[in-house]
């Protein structure tokens, strides 16, 4: 179907990529996400960035999210699902998107399934960026973000293991999961990402 026929909703064309990017804190997801959205011309939906912007602007959402973020916990599912559902309805998502930091819980993944179904749309691939725990802690503590002190880092890693790793099975069963080794130079890792993503264009 020519792309101009399917521009009236945020559903993409056949060549449009809809990607979920999953990885623990410190895996290098943000760095790779920037390269992916630039290289494949996708809308970048980073829930961490959106929440940090809301915190900085002291919006109602920001004030609410701040205390969860600073203690290494997830913000409530309803809040983040609302943000993403609004964001996905904006026109730039019609050309494809990279979801970075969402979904992070099974409840968020189910909500996303409903949003996609309602738009007669589907995901192309779920990329997991995998890095061993010891390396993650080492990278995070050197980084200096407000939620990067050692106790909060420990909490974020354990919340990831408990709440987000079940998504790997969830998407694995649907045949959507591709795991990438996140160890090595930034460009080396991006080469691995490209090998996977080039299959979808
Ligand atoms: P990281 O992956 O390094 O933990 P992010 O920038 O993706 O960092 O997110 C920072 C914080 O924002 C998380 O620790 C969490 O409190 C909150 N957050 C981001 N995305 C979500 C989400 N999908 N659900 C719940 N909380 C989220």
Image (cartoon, rainbow, N blue to C red):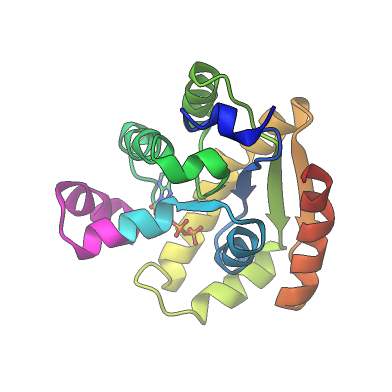
Residue 165 percent coordinates (x, y): 63, 41
Image location of residue 175, percent across then percent down: 79, 30
Q: In this view, does 140 lie above or below 16?
A: below
Secondary structure that dominates the magenta span: helix
Q: Is residue 195 left or right of residue 18?
A: right
On-image quarter of the N terminus: top right
Q: Which residues lie in the magenta part?
A: 53-69
Queried whether the magenta region covers residue 63, the answer comes back as: yes
Which of the 4 image quadrants contains residue 173? top right
Quarter-wise, where is residue 162 in the image?
top right
**120 drawn magenta:** no
The answer, for residue 146, to whether it is visible in the render is yes
Closest to the observer: 132 or 85? Answer: 85
Residue 34 position within the rendered picture, expressed as x and y whole percent measured from the top left: 57, 65
What residue appears at the point 39 percent right and 46 percent down from the top-left corner? 74
Residue occupying image coordinates x 57% and y 52%:
42
Front position in the image: 165 or 194? 194
* Residue 12 visible in the picture: no
**Is 93 rendered above or below residue 44?**
above
| Viewer-side residue, 5 vs 89 | 5
Q: How many discs appear?
A: 0
- Give me the residue at 60% from left, 76% from top: 138
- Residue appearing at x 70%, y 56% in the figure: 129
Q: Where is residue 2 in the image (x, y as percent from the top left)?
A: 67, 32
């Amino acid at each position: 179907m020519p792309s101009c026929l399917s521009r009236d909703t945020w559903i993409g064309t056949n060549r449009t990529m809809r990607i979920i990017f999953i990885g623990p804190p410190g895996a290098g997801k943000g760095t790779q996400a920037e390269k992916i959205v630039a290289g494949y011309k996708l809308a970048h939906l980073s829930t961490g960035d959106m929440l940090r912007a809301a915190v900085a602007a002291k919006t109602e959402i920001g004030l609410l999210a701040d205390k969860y973020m600073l203690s290494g916990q997830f913000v409530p599912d309803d809040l983040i699902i609302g943000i993403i559902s609004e964001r996905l309805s904006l026109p730039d998502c019609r050309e494809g998107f990279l979801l970075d930091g969402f979904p992070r819980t099974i409840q968020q993944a189910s909500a996303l399934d409903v949003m996609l179904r309602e738009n007669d749309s589907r995901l192309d691939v779920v990329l997991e960026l995998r890095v061993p725990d010891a390396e993650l802690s080492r990278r995070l503590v050197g980084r200096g973000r407000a939620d990067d002190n050692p106790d909060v880092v420990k909490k974020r890693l354990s919340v990831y293991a408990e709440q987000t790793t079940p998504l790997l099975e969830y998407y694995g069963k649907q045949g959507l999961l591709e795991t990438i080794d996140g160890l090595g130079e930034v460009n080396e890792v991006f080469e691995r990402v490209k090998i996977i993503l080039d299959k979808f264009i």
